[in-house]
Amino acid sequence: MQRLSARGAKLAGASPMAPYILEHFARKVDAWDASDNAAGYIALCIAENHLMDDLLVPWLHRDAQPPARVLAYDAMVGAQPFREQLARFFERTFLGRRFGPEQIATLAGAGTVLEALFYAIGDPGDVVLVPTPSYAGFWTDLETRNALRIEPVPCSSEDGFALTIERLDRAHAHAGGRVRALLFTNPDNPLGRVASADDVRAIAHWAESRRIHVVFDEIYALSVFGECAFTSVARVREELGPYVHIVWAFSKDFGASGLRCGVLVSENEAVIRAVDSVAYWGAVSGHTQWMLGQMISDDDFVARYTHALHERLGETYRSVAEALDTVGIPVVPAGGGIFVLCDLRRFLETPSKEAEHALWRRLVDEAGVNLTPGGACRISEPGFFRLCYAGLPRPAVLAGIERVGRILRGAETR
Ligand SMILES: Cc1ncc(COP(=O)(O)O)c(C=O)c1O
């Protein structure tokens, strides 16, 4: 008898984490290593960027001494100086205009920001529209504690998974509950697609005309390398207004998922106040704020860093796409993000969820390679797998692709 609450027992009974993540943590100890574990486990399922570690790690042990104030309690949504530094950084980079520090709230990662934001804008049972394919974690973020219900907006591979107004209308009509918000990721995870300025404008307009909130998850804003430049929703409107909110974090663009620092930008004062009221339970460490604040205030560093980020991501993407092509794996072309969606449909025994799961299992068990199965990204057509290419050294990624290719050749000739 564990004597937990009903909700505690529910959490203890079944982790809200997707099975591919649990598998990852179980196998992590046997990770691939060029010199002493070349047959080890290769994780291509986690959206991390370690391509920039050589530029970022020096910031962790610079000579500068933090002020004593980092030891103290401070505003739970982030110390004022940090929010001012963020405002300036956003203006100079992807938001393109100045928000006030009072329109900015920081919390421990984008996931925590989403949790707090949706706590403030939705009640249990309310519906949030999420276009699919989607980032797998939204279900955990929105459903675990907030008890919201996600209504997918299914997009189809037939037209490159385009998100159209018709699809939004259909999902809205089909939702069968009070629709509170649309959660739109740009650049997209898992597609790596960068939305055009027109699309961004149309999506914001669509949500606003229905008087529902629209959250733009722009966590990959700087991680772009393709032909379509990234356009933040902040660039296509004079004002965000009460319905439009932006979420970003240091986790991806600055490869710092372990530092846990996410940011909310909103002009809706009541939303910021409500988030502030729950921020105590997910605040960012004062030391981390100070260190990140120093980093983003160094304009030369930021310029050098973002230039190198685009170069390295683009170069890695091209080499990975070529390796995938060599082993006969088609991909959905990407222009941003740190992953690519692979089309393994023709390697499934049957076009079913079970066959997708069986193939994922074979790749993990026989090749020691973990890809994110499309089911976790709520892709309605079985057979797509996300491959994250920036989290491991290039030789590991290429070895993983080679191993997957070998298994697939077997699958084809069976
Ligand atoms: C689109 C998207 N939003 C949010 C998150 C969560 O980020 P964080 O680690 O900052 O909580 C991720 C992480 O993969 C993501 O891809």
Image: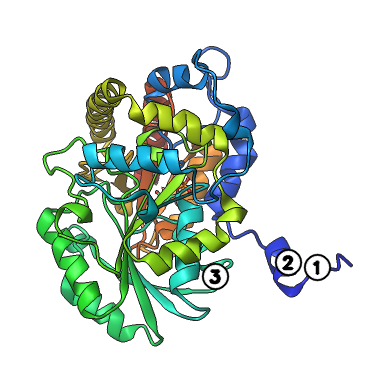
Instruction: Judge depth for marks 3 and 2 and give the one in front.
Output: 3
Per the image, label 2 sits on a secondary structure element best described as: helix
Res. 402 in view = yes
Front residue of 352/14: it is: 14
Q: CA distance from mark 1 to mark 2?
A: 5 Å
Q: How is the image coloured?
A: rainbow
Residue designated by label 2: 8
Amino acid type of the residue that numbered disc 1 sits on in the rendered structure: Leu
Q: CA distance from mark 1 to mark 3?
A: 19 Å
Amino acid type of the residue that numbered disc 2 sits on in the rendered structure: Gly
Per the image, label 1 sits on a secondary structure element best described as: loop
Amino acid type of the residue that numbered disc 3 sits on in the rendered structure: Asn
Badge 3: residue crowd in 10 Å (few <14, some 14–19, many ≥20): some
Res. 354 in view = no
Per the image, label 3 sits on a secondary structure element best described as: loop
Q: Position of residue 70 (x, y in %)?
A: 58, 33
Relative side of 229 to 340, left or right: left
